[in-house]
């Protein structure tokens, strides 16, 4: 894995190396053939997690009104970033986890299909929303989250992830959108 983008500042490069060292590969989870990226060691390292949140918040400071975090690990990062920015947080949940009324969208992922939901009152017209998740794989989940934001009348400022699995070409599912990743493999 390498730091995403070119010309990354030395501090961001050091953060990328530190985060990379904390991620754990779990083969054949949640099903055979899938290599799951376990972020638990990163979340347990208070200094590394704090540095990651500070990096993301510094980049988006003054540019977003809300942070939308995708279930489940996007909740952890998204809520922390929203707090650091002094902005609200919107959970993008799996189907059936939020009380009605909700907006929903179904999509395909690399090992099945899923549905995401948000509260119908989550966004106001014109809100600038940062969509956050841990991993960008095929892009289906991020694209579905962006669709939910826009159905609510808001505007997706960008999609931010910790790790982009570049070989899966998830950016292709997000045409015209800014995508920022700390790490790319």
Image (spheres, helix red, strand yellow):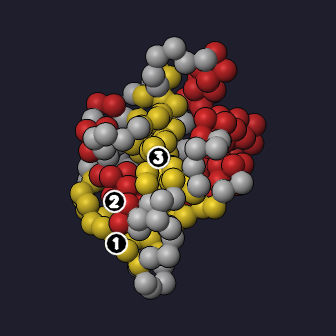
Question: Label 3: how many residues lie within 10 Å, few (<14), some (14-19) or many (20+)?
Answer: many
Q: Locate the C terminus by quadrant.
A: top left
Residue sitting nearer the eye, 102 or 95: 102
Q: Secondary structure at mark 2?
A: helix
Residue at the bottom extreme? 100
Query: Mark 1 to mark 3: distance in Å?
Result: 20 Å
| Residue 157's disc number | 3
User: Which picture quadrant has residue 171?
Assistant: top left
Mark 3 or mark 2, which is nearer the start of the sequence? 2
Looking at the image, residue 10 lies above or below residue 51? above
Mark 3 or mark 1, which is nearer the start of the sequence? 1
| Residue 181's disc number | none
User: Which picture quadrant has residue 65?
Assistant: bottom right
Residue 90's x, y, as percent?
55, 64
Query: Mark 2 to mark 3: distance in Å?
Result: 13 Å
Q: Secondary structure at mark 1?
A: strand
The residue located at (51%, 14%) in the rendering is 7
Residue 120's x, y, as percent?
44, 76
Residue 94's x, y, as percent?
41, 69
Looking at the image, residue 20 lies above or below residue 131? above
Residue 34's x, y, as percent?
32, 45
Residue at the right extreme? 47
Mark 2, mark 1: which one is toward the viewer?
2
Mark 1 or mark 2, which is nearer the start of the sequence? 1
Q: Locate the N terminus by quadrant.
A: top left
Residue that mark 2 sits on? 147
């Amino acid at each position: 894995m390498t730091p995403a983008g070119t010309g990354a500042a030395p501090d961001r490069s050091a953060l990328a190396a530190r985060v990379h060292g904390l991620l754990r590969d779990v083969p054949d989870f949640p099903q055979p053939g899938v290599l799951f990226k376990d972020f638990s060691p990163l979340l347990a390292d208070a200094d590394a997690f704090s540095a990651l949140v500070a990096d993301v918040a510094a980049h988006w400071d003054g540019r977003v009104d809300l942070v939308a975090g995708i279930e489940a690990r996007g909740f952890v990062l998204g809520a922390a970033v929203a707090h650091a920015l002094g902005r609200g947080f919107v959970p993008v949940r799996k189907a059936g986890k939020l009380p009605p009324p909700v907006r929903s969208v179904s999509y395909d992922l690399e090992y099945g299909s899923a549905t995401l939901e948000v509260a119908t009152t989550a966004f106001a017209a014109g809100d600038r929303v940062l969509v956050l998740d841990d991993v960008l794989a095929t892009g289906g989940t991020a694209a579905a989250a962006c669709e939910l934001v826009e159905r609510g009348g808001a505007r997706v400022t960008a999609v931010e992830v910790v790790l982009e699995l570049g070989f899966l070409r998830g950016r292709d599912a997000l045409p015209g959108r800014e995508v920022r990743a700390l790490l790319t493999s």
